[in-house]
Amino acid sequence: MSKPSVPTDDSVTSLAARRMVLVVQKARQIRETSDAFLRDWPTLEVRPPMPAFAWSELERQLLSLAPEELAPIVRDLVSAVRKEALPKPPEMVLREILVIAATVLDEDFRLSLAQTPGEGSPMP
């Protein structure tokens, strides 16, 4: 009978190192996309404040706009934007939120999602 494999210090260190590499790669990617965004859309000198709202309020409103079958996608998209929002310019985050809203309201997106092969019958 073989013994279950027990991670060695080397394998744990290797796994931790790999995770660190992935975290650094993701941070670089966010930095590069943020820098590119700021080149295209420099921060405006005059920036009147917007009303503050919570991520949960944003999600609730997007869910109210979305067909019920898109709810899991909306939750995932809002979560992804929220997790990466801090290091990004505010206008970039706003643009990502607007893309989610446009996607939710896009009837063609809903139809294309319904026709994805292997997903069963089309949505009503």
Image: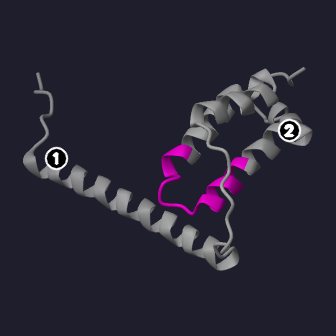
Q: Which residue is mark 2?
A: 105
User: Which residue is nearer to you in this view: 97 or 114?
Assistant: 97
Q: Which mark is residue 95?
A: none
Determine whether the residue tagged by mark 2 lies in a helix, strand or loop. helix
Is residue 87 in the magenta section?
Answer: yes
The percent coordinates of residue 19 (x first, y second) are: 31, 53
Left or right, 23 with reference to 58: left
Structural crowding at the residue carrying mark 1, measured as other residues with C-alpha within 10 Å and reported as few (<14), some (14–19) or many (≥20): few
Residue at point 64% right, 31% down?
A: 57
Left or right, 22 with reference to 88: left
Is residue 95 in the magenta section?
Answer: yes
User: Which residue is nearer to you in this view: 119 or 65?
Assistant: 65
Residue at point 69% right, 77% down?
A: 40
Magenta-drawn segment: 82-97
Left or right, 74 with reference to 102: left
**Quadrant of the rendered structure where residue 122 is?**
top right
The percent coordinates of residue 64 (x first, y second) are: 77, 26
**Quadrant of the rendered structure where residue 3 is?**
top left
Q: Which of the two discs, 2 and 1, labels the residue nearer the N terminus?
A: 1
Left or right, 39 with reference to 85: right
| Quarter of the image where the C terminus is located | top right
Q: Which residue is mark 1?
A: 12
The percent coordinates of residue 65 (x first, y second) are: 81, 30
| Quarter of the image where the N terminus is located | top left
Determine whether the residue tagged by mark 1 lies in a helix, strand or loop. helix
Q: Amino acid at mark 1?
A: Val
Residue at point 67% right, 45% down?
A: 51
Instruction: Identify the main secondary structure in magenta.
Output: helix
Can you say whether 107 is above or below 35 in the image?
A: above
- Alpha-carbon span between mark 2 and mark 1: 46 Å
